Amino acid sequence: MGDVLAGNHAVWEFDSDSVLIRFARGIRTPRQPRLFHALGTRRIPLEAVSGVTVTAGKRDTVVLRAVPRPGADPLMEAAAGQLREACDPYRLVLPGQRAPYAAAFADSLRSRLGPEAAEPAPHFLVDVPQPPLQLKAYDARVAFDGSALTFHWSRTGATSTKWKAGDQRYPLAALTGVQWSSPDGPGGHLRLLLREPRLTGADPRPSHDLAAAVFGMGYGAVHESLPFAAAVLAAVHGRTPVAAFPSPRPSDDRLEHLSELHSAGLLTDAEYVTLRDRFTAERP
C-alpha cells in the first residue's frame, strides 16, 4: 500500500505486509493516553489482523479500526477487553472530511487479508515493547528478569498472609499465563497463572494470593502494568519482547510520502511540519 494516514494520536503507515503505528503526541489534540506514549511504535503484521471497520465518531470524526486476530497480540490478550475505547491502540480517529480516505485505506487493507484471518492465530504475531524491569503495585514490587518473576512484598501494603510467607519467586516454566485486572476498575491486580494446582483451601483473593500483586490509587497504572503483563505473557509463550521496530522503508521515502500528502491537502501545515521533523530526526 505504501500510504500514511495521520490521526489524532497516531500515524498509521501501511506497507504490503504490515501496518506501522507510530503513537504521536499532539498531532491534533494536546493530550495523549499514557498507554500510547508507553507503546511508542508498533508494527502489526497483516496476518495479525482479522478485519477492519470504518465508523462515524464523535464531534465530526471518523474512526478507522483494525480488528486484531484472536491470539495474535499479547497486549490485547492480556487486556482481555478491559481497555477503554480511547485507549484502544487499534483505533485511529480522523477528521470527518477524511472519511473517503479512511474507507479507501480500509478497502486496501481488507484486500490483503488472507483466508486465515477469520481463524485464531496459532501463536503470537505481534511483539510487545520492552517493559520496565519492575512493576510497583500497592502491596508488592514485582521484578521480571526475563526468566522469572519475583514478588517483593511491601511492609505497609501487604497482608499478613503475604508478609509471613516471605518474598516469592516464579520461573517462567512454572507459569501458564497471566491475569491482568485493570486498575481503572475495582479489584485491579496482576495474577500469575501457575501450572501446579493451588493448595486446597488457598485464599483466592488477590490480597492473599502469593502469586498476585494488588493495584491501587497510584499503583499499577494501565500504561505500566499492561505492557508488563503482556511482556510476561509473551515470554511464557516463547516470544521475547522488543523495545522498538525499524521503519519498513527508508526515511527519505517517508518524507516524500508526507510531501505528497501535504500537497494533496491530506495533512495540514502543522501536521506536515510535525511529522517531517520527527522523520528527519530518525534518519541515520
Image (spheres, rainbow, N blue to C red):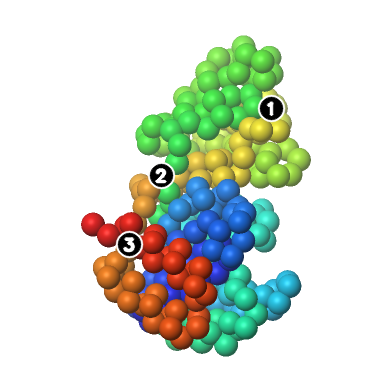
Residue 99: mark = none
Residue 280: mark = 3
Foreground tag (1 vs 3) = 3
| Sooner in the amino-acid sequence: mark 2 or mark 3 | 2
Query: Which of the image's four quarters has the N terminus?
Result: bottom left
Check disc 3: other Cα within 10 Å, few if <14, some if 14-19, many if 20+. Answer: few
Where is residue 275, by image quadrant?
bottom left
Residue 130: mark = 2
Q: Which element is circle 1 on?
A: loop
Residue 231: x and y in percent read 45, 45
Give me the C-alpha separation between circle 2 and circle 3.
Answer: 24 Å
Residue 113 appears in the figure: no
- Would residue 125 be found to the left or right of residue 57 on screen? left
Amino acid at circle 1: Ser
Amino acid at circle 3: Thr
Q: Which element is circle 2 on?
A: loop
Residue that mark 1 sits on: 207
| Sooner in the amino-acid sequence: mark 1 or mark 2 | 2
Give me the C-alpha separation between circle 1 and circle 2.
Answer: 27 Å
- Would residue 249 be found to the left or right of residue 122 on screen? left
Residue 173: x and y in percent read 40, 37
Q: Residue furthest right?
A: 186
Q: Which element is circle 3 on?
A: helix
